[in-house]
């Protein structure tokens, strides 16, 4: 008897075509770097020569405050309903507390509606479900580069959706005021390129404060981007997961604070507890959308991404304690973020590494271009391996789809001693680098890592990164302080 799904050896295929597509998808460089760290993590006492992780964006500066608040008596509460099935949209009392919290801290002009909120197990789940219900397989979304590369897999695994890059560069033109500046003209150009390639663009994704740049969109630019999307009937997904991690005096404008949105039904806000509250392991993300139809579709998928009842209760208590948030947590977190950022920036300056001026997030965007053997992404990956050989994990620009090789994201939201150790290991490696050529990596694992971003199953709808980088081979160093 023959099998319709049998392979060449007569055995039935283990996976569907969809399962094979998902299984064969290449993991991003951020995931691969984290895997290496997990296998050999730095520990001051047990593994002092382990990998020091300044690559993963986690806020580790306020664990003492969070631990103290989470161990107060009001957190020690359990009732039967918290252990039973609940509304897949999120427990009503939790959504009400989130609505009040966001109304105040995002400076919304009027009270936000709890019915417009969907709670899921992290912003990854929000990206995956929202992109799936907004787009069909093969559709595209505009996104300025560089950007958090994890978005690629979150939007592709479920929905088969592809990014359409809006390339930003460090060189400042006559029409621009700072490096990596987004303009509506660049959005228009990217949209036109996608149309010429037959890609239907359905959405624009913005990250504010930006990851990895750490800058903040001015209110006027935010409004211009919303108007642009409205003209072309595009959905706008705004990821504000670092909304409350602004550490200087720059004014942050949340999309929730705007009085009049050009297209409210197509404007969708995301936020979570991972970054602003240093709770990556809690896995709670929030979607705010006014569209009933979109919430209805998202809720059908939210059943796969629910949050435990006891977690929702604890976080409700957390958000409702305004006195603690306003007088203890937020001022202390801002102070510690600023101090840690200054230590890293100053340390890098002492060894000749300029950084992009940042105002928010947990990281800086550092310029290592002068340390590349050539202005190519192959040279960037070689340098990344040299960092790992020195037991230092930072994130290469290629992981963020940057169009210029040589930029790296470095996370500063960790203890002062780890920041200084990171600078020390970096300096040691760079001193060796100036004296010795970069060693060629030959192992299968290293080849796989170097190529992982090239093997993704999505079409970026733009010129390849390496083709772009060739135009920068004789580029002069641009200081971006």
Image (spheres, helix red, strand yellow):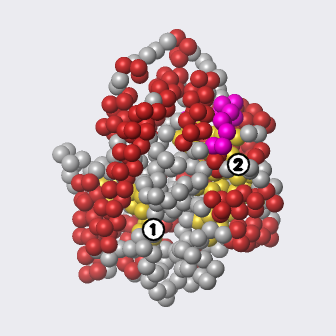
Residue 62 percent location from the top left of the image: 35, 42
Residue at 64% across, 46% down:
256
- Please report the bounds of the magenta region as a residue range: 108-121
Numbered disc 2: secondary structure: loop
Q: Residue 31 or 334: which is nearer the viewer? A: 334
Residue 113 percent location from the top left of the image: 68, 33
User: Number of callouts in the render?
Assistant: 2
Q: Which residue matches tag 1? A: 357
Q: Left or right: where does residue 425 sit relative to residue 304?
A: left
Residue 194 percent location from the top left of the image: 75, 67
Quadrant position of the N terminus in the picture? top right
Q: Residue 358 or 283: which is nearer the viewer? A: 358
Measured along the vertical axis of the image, is residue 99 above or below residue 267? above
Residue at 64% across, 80% down:
175
Magenta span contains residue 282 = no
Quadrant position of the C terminus in the picture? bottom left
Magenta span contains residue 118 = yes
**10 Å neighbourhood of mark 2: few (<14), some, or many (≥20)?**
few
Q: Which residue matches tag 2? A: 259
């Amino acid at each position: 008897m023959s099998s319709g799904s049998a392979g060449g050896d007569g055995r039935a295929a283990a996976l569907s075509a969809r399962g094979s597509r998902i299984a064969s998808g290449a993991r991003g460089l951020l995931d691969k770097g984290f895997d290496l760290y997990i296998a050999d993590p730095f520990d001051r006492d047990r593994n002092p020569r382990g990998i020091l992780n300044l690559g993963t964006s986690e806020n580790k500066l306020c664990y003492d405050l969070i631990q103290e608040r989470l161990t107060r008596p009001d957190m020690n509460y359990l009732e039967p309903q918290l252990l039973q099935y609940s509304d897949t949209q999120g427990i009503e009392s939790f959504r009400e507390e989130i609505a009040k919290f966001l109304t105040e801290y995002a400076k919304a002009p009027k009270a936000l509606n709890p019915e417009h909120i969907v709670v899921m197990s992290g912003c990854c789940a929000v990206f995956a479900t929202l992109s799936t219900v907004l787009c069909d397989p093969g559709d595209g979304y505009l996104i300025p580069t560089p950007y958090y590369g994890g978005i690629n897999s979150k939007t592709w695994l479920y929905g088969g959706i592809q990014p359409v890059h809006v390339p930003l560069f460090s060189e400042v033109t006559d029409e621009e005021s700072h490096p990596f500046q987004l303009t509506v003209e660049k959005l228009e150009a990217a949209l036109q390129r996608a149309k010429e390639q037959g890609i239907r663009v359905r959405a624009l994704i913005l990250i504010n404060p930006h990851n990895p740049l750490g800058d903040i969109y001015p209110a006027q630019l935010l409004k211009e981007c919303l108007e642009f999307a409205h003209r072309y009937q595009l959905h706008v997904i705004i990821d504000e997961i670092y909304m409350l991690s602004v550490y200087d005096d720059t004014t942050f404008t949340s999309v929730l604070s705007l009085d009049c949105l050009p297209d409210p039904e197509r404007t969708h806000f995301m936020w979570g507890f991972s970054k602003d509250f240093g709770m990556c392991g809690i896995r709670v993300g929030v979607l705010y959308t006014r569209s009933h139809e979109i919430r209805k579709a998202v809720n059908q998928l939210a059943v796969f991404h629910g949050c435990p009842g006891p977690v929702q209760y604890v976080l409700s208590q957390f958000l409702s304690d305004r006195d603690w948030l306003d007088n203890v947590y937020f001022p202390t977190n801002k102070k510690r973020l600023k101090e840690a950022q200054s230590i890293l920036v100053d340390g890098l300056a002492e060894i000749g590494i300029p950084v992009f001026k940042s105002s928010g997030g947990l990281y800086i965007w550092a310029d290592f271009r002068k340390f590349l053997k050539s202005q190519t992404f192959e040279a960037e990956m070689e340098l990344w391996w040299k960092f790992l050989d020195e037991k230092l994990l930072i994130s290469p620009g290629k992981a963020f789809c940057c169009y210029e090789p040589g930029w790296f994201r470095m996370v500063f939201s960790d203890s002062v001693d780890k920041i200084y150790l990171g600078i020390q290991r970096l300096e040691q490696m760079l001193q060796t680098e100036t004296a010795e050529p970069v060693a060629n990596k030959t192992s299968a694992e290293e080849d796989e890592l170097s190529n992982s971003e090239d093997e993704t199953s999505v079409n970026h709808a733009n010129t390849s990164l390496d083709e772009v980088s060739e135009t920068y081979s004789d580029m002069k160093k641009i200081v971006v302080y």
